[in-house]
Amino acid sequence: MSVDRRCPAAHPDDPTPCVGPVVVTVLDAGKAGADGCEHHGARLLASLDGGRVYALPDAPYRAAIRTFTAAQGIRPFCWLDGPRTEPSHLSHAENRARYGR
């Protein structure tokens, strides 16, 4: 995937390029989804409440697990600057460490 054309899971304000091919589908709580590379899939999943990730049929082994695991340590909308003080601003891993959630 070229730098000019990114996967559908890449947020327009996220400046990062794709890392690898499109291999996962990320669904929100309403079952709307986007296909993406593991990198943007993880960033999207981290920004959703109640999101899920599934490997596409031709995905490499454990692609969805890697995406899910990466999302746990990523803050929602991590490309935005500003103070991050509320639980909704923190990663799942940070919330577990601070609040036992």
Image (spheres, helix red, strand yellow):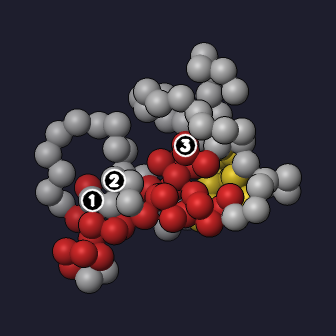
Q: At 47% from the left edge and 48% from the top edge, which residue is drawn?
A: 43
Q: Residue furthest right?
A: 58
Residue 28 visible:
no
Residue 66, given in percent of the width and then of the height, sits at: 59, 61
Real-space CA distance between mark 3 and mark 2, rounded to the nearest whole angstrom: 13 Å
**58 w.r.t. 79: above or below:** below
Q: In the drawing, what numbered circle is on residue 75?
A: 2
- The amino acid marked with disc number 3 is His
Would you call the spot at circle 3 few (<14 residues within 10 Å), some (14-19), or many (20 or more)? Answer: many
Element on which disc 1 rests:
loop
Which residue position holds label 1?
Answer: 90
Query: Viewed as shown, does residue 16 lie left or right of 6?
Result: left
- Which comes before the other along the chain, label 2 or label 1? 2
Q: Residue furthest bottom?
A: 100
- Which comes before the other along the chain, label 3 or label 2? 3
Would you call the spot at circle 1 few (<14 residues within 10 Å), some (14-19), or many (20 or more)? Answer: many
Real-space CA distance between mark 1 and mark 3, rounded to the nearest whole angstrom: 18 Å
Query: Viewed as shown, does residue 58 lie left or right of 91?
Result: right
- Which comes before the other along the chain, label 1 or label 3? 3
Circles 2 and 1, Cβ within 8 Å, touching? The answer is: yes
